[in-house]
Image (cartoon, grey):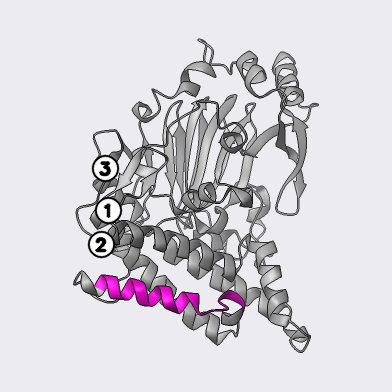
Amino acid sequence: MSTLVEIDSSSYSVDENSCVPDAIERIDSTVTYDEFFSKHLVCNRPCVIGLQATENWPCRREWVLSNGAPNFEVLRTLFGRSVVPVADCNRKFYNSQFKNDMSMESYLEYWVDYRRNCYAKSMPLLYLKDWHCVKNFPEVLIYEVPQYFVSDWLNEYYIAHPELGDDYMFVYMGPKETWTPLHADVFTSYSWSANIVGRKRWLLFPPHEENHFRDLYGQLAYDAVSEELNDHTRYKMYDSKKLKCFDIIQEIGEIIFVPSGWHHQVWNLEDTISINHNWINGCNIANVWSTLKKEMRSVMKEVDDCRDMKNWNEHCQLMLKSSYGMDYKQFLEFISFIAKNRLHAMMKKSQVVSFNKYRFGRNHCLFDLRALKTILEDIITDAQDLSVYKLMCENDEACVLLKDITTFLESCNIENVVSP
């Protein structure tokens, strides 16, 4: 039996001045879905969710020893033969960390040895990151997505398209002092991160605060606490006294919600394992689309001197896919898939079911369609302006879909254009 997920209204307005809080709120399971939706998703405000949300997860019982340490034997038994992506936290690679693949068995042997050697500075500092554990081991019961995060268009799309070989559901694990440099999440998506083992320290920066960390060339600093930032000939914008920053300790079992476009840096204070999702929905799709448009223009500017070459627009899309992870055509396919799902549910009185457990109510589907309509209108205009519309839609599919959404919303007496 699926659980209904619904919001009180299909329309929400956002007061931009209320979006950046004075402190990071801690909430518990008494907060309803609609309260979380309106206060944190629509308003793009971070929070920490209490450990009740994860207490029944199998991994909270099976991956942890009674002393709070990782259960290496269980992890080896379940996943030892898999190949996992591992970052060396002591080796910078451009503005990230050097990554390589290892067998899980080798990684766990390293970790046990590192602990045995009292975390010796002479040893590498290796962090298993961005591992598609759920995709690779669908038969292993690990966790259930909390209801607050089930409006997840990104994973709805990828789960329905296994041929793409991707998703945005990850496991991270590593010894204490492993860390992730300053960054914002892929596609300007939301993220949530649940601690299964250990504690983390997070530095969270509201949108635009990251500009304090840009050097003379606009490059983002690698480390938000580096002494290099005090070099004002290189970092002219940096002023620690004016910087808006939230310093959060995340305990075992807690989940942190990171809003769209919030830069962050994270340290593992102890040996740590976490479950992480990136996701997009009707509340942040405008941010995602805005970022994609900016990236498209950046690519076009970079190769403007080659504009006369044959298939220049196609080459720009290839570069966009490489740099951003998605081009205009796939973005349109992505939102079209979600829109058709919502339209079908509303018109055929069927259900949109998320993560095999939750079904969306009428207001929720209407909210999604209104958000999609606004974005689809702008995609069509922008793609036509950039002369890439025909690359995306050989048969005018975007305009046909927009007409279908508009006709349906008008039939529901919904005003034509509302931004979420």
Badge 3 is on which residue?
A: 4
Q: Is residue 408 magenta?
A: yes
Q: Where 223 falls versus 193 (above or below)? A: below
Q: Nearer the viewer, residue 70 or 23?
A: 70
Instruction: Label 1: state its secondary structure.
Output: helix
- Between the residue at mark 3 and the residue at mark 2, the CA separation in whole angstroms equals 20 Å
Q: Which mark is residue 12?
A: 2
Question: How would you rate the neighbour count of disc 1 (Cα within 10 Å): few for under 14, some for 14-19, many for 20 or more?
Answer: some
Instruction: Give the number of marks.
Output: 3
Q: Indicate the position of residue 112 as horizontal and vertical percent values.
A: 71, 17
| Residue 335 visible, this angle | yes
- Between the residue at mark 2 and the residue at mark 1, the CA separation in whole angstroms equals 7 Å
Of the numbered discs 3 and 1, the one sitting upstream in the chain is 3
Q: Which mark is residue 38?
A: 1
The magenta stretch is 391-409
Q: Is residue 303 magenta?
A: no
Point out the image quarter for the N terminus: top left
Which label sits in the foreground, 3 or 1? 3
Q: Are marks 2 and 1 in contact (CB under 8 Å)?
A: yes
Point out the image quarter for the C terminus: bottom left
Q: Amino acid at mark 1?
A: Ser
Residue at position x 57%, y 47% in the image? 167
